[in-house]
Amino acid sequence: MKSNVCRYMTVLLGATVLLGGCQNSGTQDSREREALEKLGQIQVITRESGSGTRSSLAQALGLDEEGVDDRDHITDTAQVAASGEEMIGAVARSEGALGYVSLGTGENEDSEVRALAVDGVTPDAAAIESGEYPLSRTLCLASQDDGNALKEDFLTFVTGKGQETVEKFLVPAADGKDVFLSGQPSGTLRIHGSTSLAPLMEALAEEYEEINPAAEIDVEASDSTQGITDTLTGACDMAMVSRELYAYEADLLTAVPVAKDGIRILVHADNPLEGISMDALKGIYSGDITEWAETNEK
């Protein structure tokens, strides 16, 4: 009899714990729904036309316009931010905002923004290196094959010894090398383009100039398309590019991978969401989803 009572009590206790867990889960889901409803309308923030980060996002979400450069179907009602830093500031100022930045565009520890998991994957170095994170991409330096000795020496540094520095900002694109022996070419190298790549390139330029004092590396941030245009017109020597080259660009330029990156989806710190799906992101950036309550997929 005692044994039967013990078995009965064990089953009853297990059922109680299970029921309590379900109730807690349901309560949490209910609270999240209520919090999302209170947030109301989504304040969609995007980058400017010409931004490689915008182009990469549009392509990943299937919102790019095939065959038309820098054209996409991101909603016209979206607020435009001219840089990753401006994007972070805009999201931090509004509890209902949603935006995106490069992995290398960091926020302060006390920032009012945080990144969401996408399709259940957190945008960390391991997920980006493996390609598991759905918004992963490769950042490149693109240039013409013109026999510029300084450019070639700098690229050898960036794709070799410089990958140690890449790891401090983004995810290395190559294994790198322990030693770099510069040919000491002299002159000035002008690099224009993507704001996602600019902080890293500034650090690499400074390190290279220490190795080769005869060189001067000028880095100017704008956007990927402007950097490519400047390279093709001779206004600079290399373009920092955070998107895939368009067909005609690939015919004229050679792209050298510098780093792997992931586009982080940002929300205000008070937003209850922990993650979002690619389908929901597409709905938001196309304008089909306009309310935070519509993003709750539980």
Image (cartoon, grey):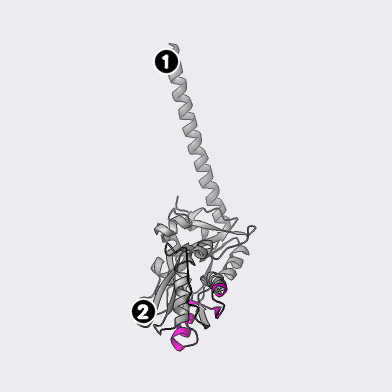
Q: Nearer the viewer, mark 2 or mark 1?
A: 2
Q: Residue furthest top?
A: 1
In the image: residue 178, left or right of residue 91: left
Q: Residue furthest bottom?
A: 233
- Magenta-colored stretch includes residue 217: yes
Marked residue nearer the N-terminal end (2 or 1): 1
**Front residue (pair 291, 227):** 227
* Residue 78 is at least partly visible in this image: no
At label 1, counting other C-alpha atoms closer than 10 Å, the crowd grade (few under 14, some 14-19, many 20 or more) is few
Is the Cβ of the residue at disc 2 closer than 8 Å to that at disc 1?
A: no
Residue 250 bears which disc, if any? 2
**Which of the 4 image quadrants contains residue 215?**
bottom right
Amino acid type, mark 1: Asn
Q: Position of residue 122 (x, y in %)?
A: 47, 55
Residue for point 40% across, 57% down: 130
- Magenta-colored stretch includes residue 274: no
Residue 4 bears which disc, if any? 1
Segment colored magenta: 209-237
Residue 134 bears which disc, if any? none
Amino acid type, mark 2: Ala
**Quadrant occupied by the N terminus:** top left
